[in-house]
Image: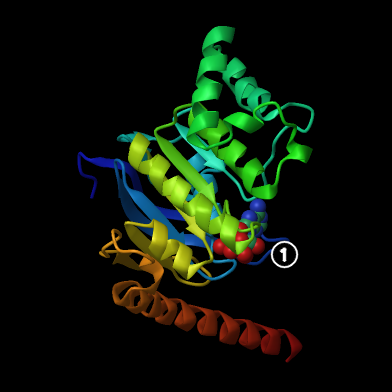
């Protein structure tokens, strides 16, 4: 049930897709109920195809639930809105605009006057450590820098909720780790509510205050794990607490991956039988 402090409430959310044949619709997300508190960093982790992106699309208002409801500050989400910023795996920057102008472009749509656009873009370029690359075009930036611009662009809108769909998946390990640190710093500085999707167990535990583990098809909430670790120690990922949580989440996920594999084998066997 919803509480006053919940930023997002998912209440019995199911999403089905029509299939080509006359058979039953395909259930991608099944009866998910979950609350995300204001200012919380929640990570969704689950096996491939379990409905993570579908869930994020639902939160973004890009698609509607078949049943159940999603509330933002107590009001049902009916479509995309400036109160939610989405960061995808792909950078989606305009190639003919500089980093600065990519950020300013979206603020134009928001109707901000020129001077203010410039100031806001500058602030967020600084926040993601790219002020000296402001006049560079996307092709002159590394993958990590492009993703920083994409994050800065989303933040510049000042959305209350940031929805991130595997934003660091395409990056090398070092860049990913430094962007994870940067995101945590930004989250602490801005107090945004973040819903972050990943395949990576380490990434989930490193970033999340809570990690929601999804089941394989259809996607349901298997468990929500509280990440109570001491983040002030050096090399958090090597700490005993971190390793124990990693093992816990790995065990939960591994069971789901095995289950998905045997279901696939069964249906392949049935269709050949
Ligand atoms: N528009 C659609 N029409 C039909 N089926 C869809 C549609 N979108 C997603 N699906 C199906 O729903 C299931 C969940 O997809 P989704 O992309 O949400 O999973 P995911 O957990 O994000 O996967 P991955 O981790 O591999 O990115 C998949 O089986 C997918 O084929």
Q: Position of residue 142 (x, y in %)?
A: 70, 46
**Residue 15 visible somewhere in the drawing:** no
Residue located 59% across and 66% down the image: 49
Quarter assignment of residue 212? bottom left
Pointer 1 local density, CA inside 10 Å: few below 14, some 14–19, many at least 20: few
Q: Is residue 150 left or right of residue 209?
A: right
According to the picture, the residue beneath numbered tag 1 turns out to be 21
Residue located 29% across and 74% down the image: 241
Closer to us: 130 or 188: 130
Q: Position of residue 111 (x, y in %)?
A: 56, 12
CB of mark 1 near ligand 1 (< 8 Å): no
**Residue 101 visible somewhere in the drawing:** yes
**Type of colouring:** rainbow
Quarter assignment of residue 32? bottom left
Rendered position, 46 above or below 113: below
Q: Position of residue 19 (x, y in %)?
A: 67, 61
Which residue of the protein is positioned furthest toward the left in this rendering? Answer: 4
Ligand 1 occupies quarter: bottom right
Closer to us: 166 or 181: 181
Q: Is residue 120 left or right of residue 169?
A: left
Tally of numbered discs: 1
Q: Secondary structure at mark 1?
A: loop
Rendered position, 236 above or below 177: below
Q: Position of residue 92 (x, y in %)?
A: 69, 39
Closer to us: 57 or 248: 248
Q: Is residue 146 left or right of residue 204?
A: right
The quadrant in which the C terminus is found is bottom right
Q: Is residue 159 left or right of residue 174?
A: left
Residue located 45% across and 51% down the image: 181
Quarter assignment of residue 87? top right
Residue located 63% across and 82% down the image: 264
């Amino acid at each position: 049930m919803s509480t006053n402090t919940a930023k997002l409430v998912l209440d019995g959310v199911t999403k089905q897709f029509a299939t080509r044949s006359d058979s039953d619709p395909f259930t991608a997300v099944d009866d998910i109920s979950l609350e995300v508190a204001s200012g919380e960093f929640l990570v969704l982790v689950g096996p491939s195809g379990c409905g993570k992106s579908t869930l994020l699309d639902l939160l973004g208002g890009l698609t509607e639930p078949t049943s159940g409801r999603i509330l933002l500050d107590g009001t049902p989400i009916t479509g995309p809105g400036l109160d939610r910023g989405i960061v995808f795996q792909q950078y989606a920057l305009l190639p003919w605009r500089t980093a600065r102008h990519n950020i300013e472009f979206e603020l134009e749509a928001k109707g901000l006057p020129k001077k203010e656009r410039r100031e806001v873009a500058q602030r967020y370029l600084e926040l993601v450590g790219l002020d000296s690359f402001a006049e560079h075009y996307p092709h002159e930036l590394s993958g990590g820098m492009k993703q920083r611009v994409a994050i800065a662009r989303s933040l510049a809108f000042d959305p209350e909720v940031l929805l991130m769909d595997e934003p660091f998946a395409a990056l090398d390990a070092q860049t990913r780790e430094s962007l994870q640190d940067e995101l945590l710093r930004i989250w602490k500085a801005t107090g945004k509510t973040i819903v972050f999707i990943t395949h990576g167990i380490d990434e989930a535990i490193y970033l999340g205050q809570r990690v929601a583990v999804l089941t394989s098809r259809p996607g349901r909430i298997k468990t929500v794990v509280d990440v109570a670790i001491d983040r002030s120690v050096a090399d958090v990922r090597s700490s005993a607490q971190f390793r124990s949580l990693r093992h816990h989440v790995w065990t939960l996920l591994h069971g789901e991956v095995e289950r998905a594999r045997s279901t696939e084998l069964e249906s392949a066997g049935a269709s050949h039988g």
